[in-house]
Amino acid sequence: MANKTNSTKISGIRERTHKSVDKIMDKAESMNESGKEKLALLKEKASMMREDVDGYIKKNPEKSVLIAAGVGAVVGAIIVASMMRRRQ
């Protein structure tokens, strides 16, 4: 009789565990799909931004070069300042 009771308990635990695992798997699949959708949207936005930047560069090549040079100078100055701090 004790074996049947234990067997019944084990079966109940197994069934609840399987249901819990199924719920977790369903949630993981849902999150995966949501992530894929968000990634696709992000790629689309990045592509649109790239097109906007390309258009700006074509319309304003001189300004684009000056902006790039300015950004490069700022990044270079930050790197040099960072390296100088490490040496001290």
Image (cartoon, rainbow, N blue to C red):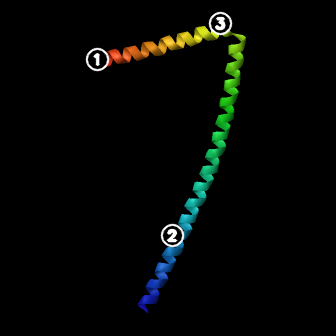
Residue 36 or 31: which is nearer the viewer? 36
Q: How far from the left and from the top, in percent, is residue 46? A: 65, 30
Which kind of residue does numbered mark 3 sit on? Glu
Q: What residue sits 49% from the left and 11% below the top? A: 73
Say above or below: 55 vs 2. Answer: above
For mark 3, what is the residue? 62
Is disc 2 placed on a helix, strand or loop?
Answer: helix
Q: What residue sits 59% from the left and 11% below the top? A: 67
Closer to us: mark 2 or mark 3?
3
Residue 14 or 79: which is nearer the viewer? 79
**Label 3 crowd (10 A; few <14 / some 14-19 / many >=20):** few
Question: In the rendered image, which quarter contains the N terminus?
Answer: bottom left
The Cα atoms of the two marked residues, 2 and 1, are separated by 58 Å
Count of all numbered marks drawn on residues in the image: 3
Which kind of residue does numbered mark 1 sit on? Arg
Question: In the rendered image, which quarter contains the C terminus?
Answer: top left
Is disc 3 placed on a helix, strand or loop?
Answer: helix
Q: How far from the left and from the top, in percent, is residue 72? A: 51, 13
Which kind of residue does numbered mark 2 sit on? Thr
**Label 2 crowd (10 A; few <14 / some 14-19 / many >=20):** few
Say above or below: 39 vs 29. Answer: above
Q: In which image quadrant can residue 28 be found?
A: bottom right
Q: In which image quadrant can residue 56 be found?
A: top right
Is disc 1 placed on a helix, strand or loop?
Answer: helix
Going by the image, does 40 lie left or right of 15? right
Disc on res. 17? 2
Q: How far from the left and from the top, in percent, is residue 18? A: 54, 70
Say above or below: 8 vs 62. Answer: below
Outermost residue, bottom direction? 1
Looking at the image, is mark 1 or mark 3 earlier in the sequence? Answer: 3
For mark 1, what is the residue? 87
The Cα atoms of the two marked residues, 2 and 3, are separated by 66 Å
